[in-house]
Image (cartoon, coloured by chain):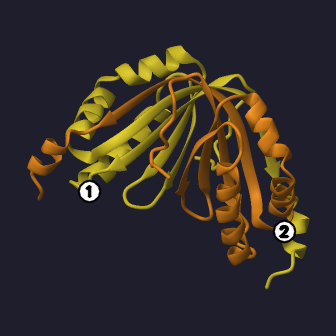
Chain colours: A yellow, B orange
Amino acid sequence: MNLPATTPDPPYYAVIFSPVRSGEDPEGYQRMALHMIELAMTMPGFLGIEHGEGLDGFAITVSYWRDEAAIKQWYENAEHRAAQAHGKAVWYRQFELRVAKVERAYGFTRPTSLLHLAPRE
Amino acid sequence: MNLPATTPDPPYYAVIFSPVRSGEDPEGYQRMALHMIELAMTMPGFLGIEHGEGLDGFAITVSYWRDEAAIKQWYENAEHRAAQAHGKAVWYRQFELRVAKVERAYGFTRPTSLLHLAPRE
């Protein structure tokens, strides 16, 4: 899995999931989170996923999808539905879920030569 | 600052910034990052910001904005421009920047009573 996610030219969709974990059942949460990523990667229209951890149980997971139909299919997946229900009951204290259409994107990669020559303090 | 960000009903915009840091000048990076958040909060049309850290220098920062005009004004801010240039030269090895229109959003907060009553292992 590439980070940042390697995505095609826009338009495509981003699902921005911003939870605050409850702190309950951390091992079960970790197992589910990894399994959901594996499962998402098998879904039609999946383009990539990025994840970061904040303070006090906050996290952001952004998954990228070809279109709304792909997102709908993912949300209706039976295993994913079960994980969503368990998340509300146990793992998450709060979350915000946003579906956004990526309209433009810009990528930057520093030339390797500049990385090697860059001064280090 | 609330996490997740407290945002109005859609539509509004998300700027998804997904960098891989170079590892150079970490103190300067931290100072800049905090200052840029403070500066963004003063900009017209700023709605909120969320940040998470991944592995190996990867991070995600999602900032939310009222409209494209607000994003444009933020990107053209002189201090922000200087930080962008320094980021490409020193702090970032790579990044992906995506501008997305949030079309729908769903928030969940677990009732406090359920949190207190939830079994802990």
* Residue that numbered label 2 is attached to: A115
* Residue that numbered label 1 is attached to: A23
Which residue lies at the image location 25% right of the left edge and 37% below the top edge?
Answer: A88
Q: Is residue B59 above or below residue A106?
A: below
Give the chain letter at badge 2: A
Residue B12, given in percent of the width and then of the height, sits at 61, 27
Residue A4, given in percent of the width and then of the height, sits at 65, 48
Residue A12, given in percent of the width and then of the height, sits at 65, 24
Residue B91 - label: none
| Contact check, label 2 and label 1, Cβ < 8 Å | no
Q: Residue furthest top?
A: A69
Marks 2 and 1, the one that precedes in the sequence: 1
Label 2 sits on a secondary structure element that is: helix
Give the chain letter at badge 1: A
Label 1 sits on a secondary structure element that is: loop
Which residue lies at the image location 73% right of the left edge and 51% below the top edge?
Answer: B95
The kind of residue on which mark 1 rests is: Gly
